[in-house]
Image (cartoon, rainbow, N blue to C red):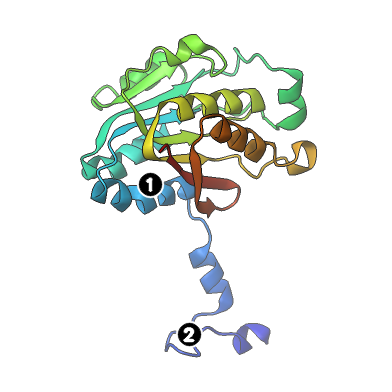
Amino acid sequence: MLDNRYKTNLLYKDEETLDDLIKKLDHQHPIQRKLQFFLDIRGILKTNFIKGSYVEYGCFKGETIFACEKILEETMVMDNYYGIDLFSNEELNLSSSDLESNQFDSKHPFLFESFDEIKEAFKNKNKINFIKGDLNDKNTFKQLKINEINVALIDCNFLSSLESSIIHALDNICDFGFLFIDDYFTNLKKSGLVVDTILRREIKNRNYKLVDYKIYAPFAKSFMILKK
């Protein structure tokens, strides 16, 4: 009875129920929040010619970086796209804080069986580059051949990796560059809003200005970074 009462046709002719509307508005894809972020910033990057490279800290299956190139390449401001990951669950080196503050399914499968396989799959994408390495190892970042980062996306399962990724992104981001942190609102009961604390500390250390951009359900948040 309530479904019939609350049809969304008060102003429109469509006989759409609330259930229909909820299904339409709900996420249709696991990485929809990231796709929406790329679509949202596309016009800002292009109009203001915010030039640089995209760096994805924790690229997992390569799906997000593939979609990013599809969406942002038309802006004509993207130098290259870099995805960093271990591409294996066998090389994880977890600290006690990682184990306490984060949740991770060590059996979660990768789409590709090896680093060589993902490189082979993307061999015709000349601007997409993958780097195999630990995000806590500074030597991993030395493999990046970038001038500046204009879009940084951080999707790390562990607090230590997330912190090192934030530091590297801020050290290399351009003025008016964008930062997207996927796990901003996860594990709050265990660690509090620790990601926010880390980010604002690093922003303060550099005398940058952090501009809130958007929240992307269920747990991501994005920012624009002002360096001047």
Q: Which residue is mark 1?
A: 38
Q: Which of 217 and 13 lies nearest the eye of the viewer?
A: 217
Snapshot quadrant of residue 227: top left
Using the numbered discs, state the Cα–Cα distance from disc 2 to disc 1 in whole angstroms: 33 Å
Determine the residue positioned at 47% across, 30% down.
Answer: 170
Q: Could you tell me if the residues under marks 2 and 1 are in contact, i.e. CB atoms within 8 Å?
A: no
49 vs 81, left or right, is: left
Q: What is the number of the mark on residue 17?
A: none
Q: Secondary structure at mark 2?
A: loop
Asked if residue 170 is positioned above or below residue 47 in the image, the reply reads above
128 vs 84, left or right, is: left
Earlier residue among tags 2 and 1: 2
Asked if residue 6 is positioned above or below residue 48 in the image, the reply reads below
Determine the residue positioned at 62% across, 15% down.
Answer: 92
Q: Which of 121 and 46 lies nearest the eye of the viewer?
A: 46
- Residue found at the far top of this picture: 139
Q: Secondary structure at mark 1?
A: helix
- Quarter holding the N terminus is bottom right
The x, y position of residue 84, in whole percent, is 45, 22
Q: Which residue is mark 2?
A: 15
Q: Amino acid at mark 1?
A: Phe
The x, y position of residue 90, in whole percent, is 60, 13
The x, y position of residue 214, in whole percent, is 50, 53
170 vs 73, left or right, is: right
Snapshot quadrant of residue 226: top left
Report the label total: 2
Determine the residue positioned at 60% across, 51% down.
Answer: 218
Kindly report which numbered mark, 2 or 1, lies closer to the viewer in this rendering: 1
Q: Amino acid at mark 2?
A: Glu
The x, y position of residue 118, in whole percent, is 38, 22
Determine the residue positioned at 72% across, 17% down.
Answer: 95
